[in-house]
Image (spheres, helix red, strand yellow):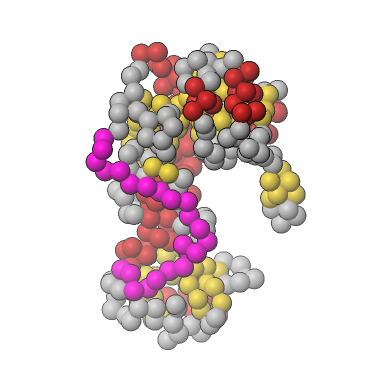
C-alpha cells in the first residue's frame, strides 16, 4: 500500500517509525516547514522530515496547505492512503479525497471526548481517569470522522501530560499498524452525539495558577501543563515555576506558604516538590523554602 504520511512532532515520528518498520511503502512525508529551535535559534527540520531524509523518502513542507497547488502535489503522488498524525494543519476536502482510500488520523483521546489540538493535555487538566487513542476516518470536520479502532489506558495519578504524550504515541503507533493491516475489513463507527468536549490549544497564560481553586484541581493543572506551557505563580514579583507538586491535607489561606513547602488553596494544600526561580536551577521545595526563607510569604 502506497502511504502518504502527514505529521510533524515526536508523537507523529513514533507512528512513522512503526509503519516503516512494518514494511509499508511510505511514498511521501508531509510536515510543517523547518523552524528555529534551541538556544542558538538554529533552523532545524521536524523530526519526521529528518527520519524521511535518512531513509530516502520524499518530503513536502508547504507553507500553505489550503491552496490548489498543495492539493495538486498530493494528488500527483498517487497515494493509496493518507495517514495523519499531529500534522498541525487543517486539510481541505480535496486533499482528504486525494488518496484512493482517503485519510485516517491517529488522535490522542477517546473520541468524541477532547476533539481538537491538545487532547493529551486536557485529559490530564480535567482529571480524567482514563484516555486513549482513536484511529479515525477523516472528514472535513474537526475530529468528527467515524472511528475505525480505539484503545484505552488509565491515566496515572502522578502522570504528567508529557509522560502521557509519550505513552499514547506508542499505543497509537501499535494501533495504527494493526488498523492499516485490517483496513479493508473495517467500517468506521460514527461518533456519538453525547460526550463531546473540545481541547483548545494551550497558551502561556494558561500556566498561571489560581490558589483559590482546590488542591486536587491545581495538582491536575501542574501535571497537565508539564512540560509546556508550565505552571507558575508569582513570588516576590517574579514567576516561580512549579515543576512538580502534590495535594495534601492542610488548612492554610489560599496562596500562603506554610511549613513543609505547603501552599494553601481553596480546599487543602499543595506541597511544592520541585520549583525553579528565574535564572536558577530547579530545586526541591525544601531547598526553596530554606534558600528563599519563604515561610509566611505568599504565592499569587
Above or below residue 202? Residue 117 is: above
In this rendering, the answer to whether 204 lies above or below 47 is: below
- How far across and down, in percent of the image, does residue 224 sit? 42, 55
x and y, in percent, of residue 190 in the image:
30, 28
Of the pair 140 and 16, the residue shown nearer to us: 140
Taking the image as drawn, is residue 192 in sight? yes
Residue at 31% over, 63% down: 216
Q: Is residue 93 left or right of residue 266?
A: right
Residue at x-position 30% and y-position 74%: 266
What residue span does the magenta drawing correspond to?
192-214
**Can you tell which quarter of the image residue 291 is in?**
bottom right
Q: Main secondary structure of the magenta part?
A: loop
| Name of the residue lying farthest toward the left | 194
Say left or right for 56 vs 107: right
Depth order, front residue of 33/9: 33
In x, y percent, where is residue 39?
Answer: 71, 56
Answer left or right for 18 relative to 136: right
> Residue 211 sits in which quadrant?
bottom left
Is residue 83 or residue 242 the one in the foreground?
A: 83
Amino acid at each position: 500500500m502506497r502511504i502518504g504520511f502527514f505529521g510533524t512532532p515526536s508523537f507523529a515520528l513514533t507512528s512513522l517509525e512503526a509503519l516503516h518498520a512494518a514494511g509499508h511503502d511510505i511514498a511521501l512525508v508531509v510536515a510543517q516547514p523547518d523552524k528555529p529551535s534551541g538556544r542558538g535559534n538554529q533552523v532545524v527540520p521536524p523530526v519526521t522530515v529528518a527520519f524521511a531524509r535518512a531513509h530516502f523518502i520524499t518530503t513536502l513542507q508547504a507553507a500553505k496547505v489550503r491552496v490548489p497547488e498543495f492539493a495538486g502535489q498530493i494528488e500527483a503522488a498517487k497515494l493509496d492512503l493518507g495517514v495523519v498524525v499531529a500534522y498541525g494543519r487543517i486539510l481541505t476536502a480535496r486533499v482528504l479525497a486525494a488518496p484512493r482510500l482517503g485519510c485516517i488520523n491517529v488522535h490522542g483521546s477517546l473520541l468524541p471526548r477532547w476533539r481538537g489540538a491538545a487532547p493529551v493535555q486536557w485529559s490530564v487538566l480535567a482529571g480524567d481517569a482514563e484516555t486513549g487513542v482513536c484511529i479515525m476516518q477523516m472528514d472535513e470536520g474537526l475530529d468528527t470522522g467515524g472511528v475505525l479502532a480505539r484503545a484505552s489506558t488509565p491515566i496515572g495519578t502522578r502522570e504528567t501530560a508529557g509522560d502521557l504524550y509519550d505513552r499514547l504515541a506508542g499505543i497509537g503507533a501499535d494501533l495504527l499498524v494493526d488498523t492499516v493491516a485490517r483496513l479493508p475489513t473495517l467500517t468506521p463507527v460514527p461518533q456519538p452525539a453525547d460526550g463531546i468536549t473540545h481541547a483548545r490549544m494551550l497558551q502561556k497564560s494558561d500556566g498561571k495558577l489560581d490558589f483559590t481553586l482546590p488542591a486536587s484541581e491545581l495538582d491536575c493543572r501542574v501535571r497537565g501543563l508539564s512540560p509546556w506551557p508550565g505552571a507558575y505563580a508569582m513570588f516576590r514579583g517574579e514567576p516561580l515555576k512549579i515543576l512538580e507538586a502534590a495535594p495534601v491535607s492542610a488548612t492554610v489561606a489560599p496562596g500562603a506558604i506554610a511549613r513543609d513547602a505547603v501552599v494553601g488553596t481553596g480546599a487543602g494544600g499543595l506541597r511544592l516538590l520541585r520549583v525553579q526561580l528565574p535564572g536558577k536551577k530547579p530545586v526541591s521545595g525544601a531547598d526553596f523554602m530554606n534558600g528563599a526563607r519563604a515561610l509566611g510569604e505568599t504565592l499569587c
